[in-house]
Amino acid sequence: MNDNTNLTRRACCSDCAETTPLTCPTIMSIITSIAHQEDALACILNAECAKINKVVTNYSDLDDLLAIDTSVEKILIQTVALEGILKAKLDSVIPLLTG
């Protein structure tokens, strides 16, 4: 291990200097939080899918279909934005894992 890696890990938390990256509690907490947030986004997307299926099955009115389309589009835009934030969060942790 080089000195730069030790400095990076020490900046993360005091325990990281003595542990491997995958056993550092701070790094693992960040990775776990990313996984939980991804799981929550998956649940939101599944709910949107169920909403679309219900409307398409039960309604044939164009206004209802357009309203659900607009609603789902807003959720998808927000989900994509959150995915970008989670990607940046993960990208910031990867150097600690590979360093």
Image (cartoon, grey):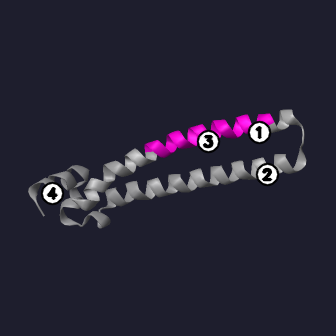
What residue is disc 3 on? 76
Mark 3 nearby-residue class (10 Å; few <14, some 14–19, many ≥20): some
Distance (Cα) linking label 1 and label 2? 10 Å
- Quick one: 88 or 22, which is closer to the camera? 88
Q: Residue at x 51, y 39 (%)?
A: 81
- Number of the label disc, if any, that sits on residue 6: 4
Compare marks 3 and 2 and give the one earlier in the sequence: 2
Please identify the quadrant where the C terminus is shown: bottom left
Within the magenta stretch, is there residue 42? no
Mark 2 nearby-residue class (10 Å; few <14, some 14–19, many ≥20): few
Q: In this view, does 23 lie to the left or right of 48?
A: left
Distance (Cα) linking label 3 and label 2? 16 Å
Q: Residue at x 32, y 48 (%)?
A: 92
Helix, strand or loop under label 1: helix
Provide the residue span drawn in magenta: 66-85
User: Disc 2 residue type?
Assistant: Asn
Distance (Cα) linking label 3 and label 1? 12 Å
Q: Cβ–Cβ below 8 Å for labels 1 and 2? A: no
Q: Cβ–Cβ below 8 Å for labels 3 and 4? A: no
Compare marks 3 and 4 and give the one earlier in the sequence: 4
Q: Which residue is drawn at 77% across and 39% down?
A: 68
Helix, strand or loop under label 3: helix
Distance (Cα) linking label 4 and label 1? 52 Å
Q: Which tag is nearer the camera, tag 4 or tag 1?
A: 1
Q: In this view, does 75 lie to the left or right of 23?
A: right
What residue is disc 2 on? 53
- Number of the label disc, if any, that sits on residue 68: 1
User: Disc 4 residue type?
Assistant: Asn
Compare marks 4 and 2 and give the one earlier in the sequence: 4
Helix, strand or loop under label 2: helix
Q: Main secondary structure of the magenta part?
A: helix
Distance (Cα) linking label 4 and label 2? 52 Å
